[in-house]
Amino acid sequence: MSDQPSEASRPPENPKEAGAPGPPEPPSSSEVAGPPAAGRPDTTPARSAGEPATDAPPSAVRDPAPARASGTPRQRAQGAPKAGVPGNPWQHGAGAPAAPGDGATARLRPPPPSLIRPAVLGSVLATALLSAIFLGDGLGVNLLIVAVPAALAAFFAARAAGRRLRPWTAAWAVGGLALLAVPALRDAGWPTFLAVVSAFALGSLALHGSRTWPGVLIGSLGLFDSVVPGIIWGVRGVRARAEGSRARWGAALRTTLVALVLLVVFGTLFAGADAAFAELLGGLVPDASVGEGPWRIFLFALGLAGALAAAHAAAAPVRWDGITVRPGKPRGRAEWALPLIVLDLLFAAFVILQLVVLLGGYDKVRDVTGLSHAEYARQGFWQLLWATLLTLLVIALALRWAPRGGTGDRTLVRAVLGPLCVLTLVVVASALRRMDLYVDEYGLTRLRISVAAMELWLGVVLILILAAGVFGARFLPRAIAVSAAAGVLAFGLLSPDGLIAEQNVQRFEDSRSTAIDIDYVKDLSADAVPALDRLPEPERSCALRVIQNDVLRADTPWYATSWGEARAKEILEKRPVKGDARDCYGAGREGTRDGYEPDDDGYDPY
């Protein structure tokens, strides 16, 4: 399926004499509407100059301007299309000048969608109920359970609006659901937080389908903009459908009540007759008390608002790609290129020295500088990280003011910025090598693995920029967003707490460290239990005592328990910790810690 909207899905053109400014092309990832209904006058203004033209239907020539809405005030507020005809979310001509008094984003907004469909309403209510039932006890597989009906509500709403599934839309949606698997697998809170935030951003991009820099940056948060319109849309839809259908609503309510009564009565009888069935039923049904009522009501409202926002954004997405950033004033070749060439030469001089280090190893470093592992790594890692970030900023600003006169200017830009990206990749490799030396000497920590992952992702961004210089920058914003989401997913699936524990235990087993830092590893999550379980006593019990208290005493239901927590519980039930906490006072406190003596007041940035 092509990434670009098909001709049938684009708004038909008006003749040039209409004089209306043309809308920007709808985002290619998902904003694709169905063709205009037969016999229905088209209201889309003319396409902007420079875009490929399509044959305009006769109706567009007869009626170049939108007709004033007629009917009841309710119909005018809803902007409902004719019965049986799906609405076109792009027929409003976004990009045209906003009317006086409209908001700053009025030209980006489509008209209100048609009445909420029963399938959308059912999915929204299912999301709200599941949120109230499952989200009150923690995070785990329950996020996936709640996300499925919310995704269905968005799908049904987009389908009713005439939108089609595009490859980028599918990629964003699948990526968001995959990120929600991290809380189901890992117990650590920090990768879970990153995964949930990234899943929200990808879900918002799937609904809005942005492809430009402003579209990707704002569209990842655009779901917040649909919360209030989504609630209003849902309330109006329920009111409109409730009029004249009270008999059907009454029948549905009676059916639901009868089903609930039957489940409660017979479920109670079977639970009292068989202990195994009672235990199974108790594990499946969430525990809820009267005191949790306000909390459950809040979760119900949160799920309801979130699902309505997603459905509204799918039916009438805001076109964030309509926000344009004007390029800077082109500079002369010499004025633009000379400062960057000087920066290239500086990078080249630094890189030549770094290649000696990367190829020669630590012995070469010690012979040349006299620094230890820790001193060498601590001396420059953060500076190299900042150098990488600033280089990306310099590249962005250089492209903004680059000369744009023709082929010669494009060749100059590539010749100057290409080497800068390549040299910065060597800087990234040098920073990672310094961190590797430090970790090999003093072990892995959360901060060290986080900044190393950040530096690695910056290297991926540089590679994408190099590829954009060769193949074009059309997909660069979306490619960088995909790389960030993939990095967060890989970071969560690799279990950082498990890697930290594994690396420190391995150093202890290889006798590279006289003692393991108990004060640090005991605060890791349950993901670290399989690695810490290999330690000898008393180090094992000292490292696992706090984790055991948290895991075995927690009465967390199945839907809020991660796989890492369940695995840790199984290990600790088979081999509980031994001894007393007083046995841990001297354990793990010999030698150095984090690269400095315990009594030293020196500051360690790691």
Image: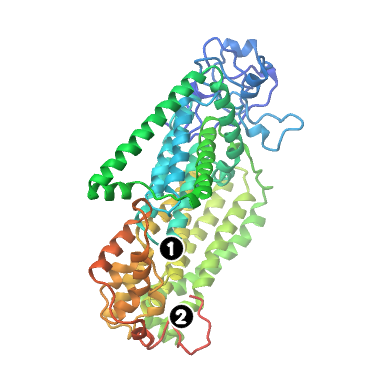
Quadrant of res 498: bottom left
Q: What mark, if any, has residue 356 been given in the picture?
A: none
Task: Residue under label 1, please give it.
Answer: 453
- Residue found 39% across the figure and 54% down from its top: 183
In terms of sequence position, does the residue under pointer 1 or pointer 2 come before the other? 2
Where, quadrant-wise, is the N terminus in this rendering? top left
Q: Label 1, label 2: how many angstroms apart (C-alpha)?
A: 20 Å
* Secondary structure of residue under mark 1: helix
Q: Is residue 219 above or below residue 579?
A: above
- Residue farthest bottom in this picture: 599
Say if 354 sits above or below 126 in the image: below
Q: Amino acid at mark 1?
A: Ala
Of residues 144 and 486, which is closer to you in this image? 144
Along the line of sight, which residue is nearer the eye, 9 or 274? 274
The one of 318 and 382 positioned closer to us in this rendering: 318
Residue 121 image offset from top left, x and y in percent: 48, 30
**Which residue lies under the disc numbered 2?**
376
Query: How many numbered markers are drawn?
Result: 2
Q: Quick check: 268 left or right of 307?
A: left
Q: Which numbered disc, 1 or 2, marks the residue closer to the eye? A: 1
| Looking at the image, residue 506 lies above or below residue 147 | below
Q: Position of residue 145 (x, y in %)?
A: 39, 43
Q: Position of residue 84 (x, y in %)?
A: 49, 15
> Mark 2 belongs to which amino acid?
Tyr
Q: Secondary structure at mark 2?
A: helix
Q: Residue at x 46, y 20 (%)?
A: 248
Instruction: Tell whether label 2 touches label 1 (CB within 8 Å).
Output: no
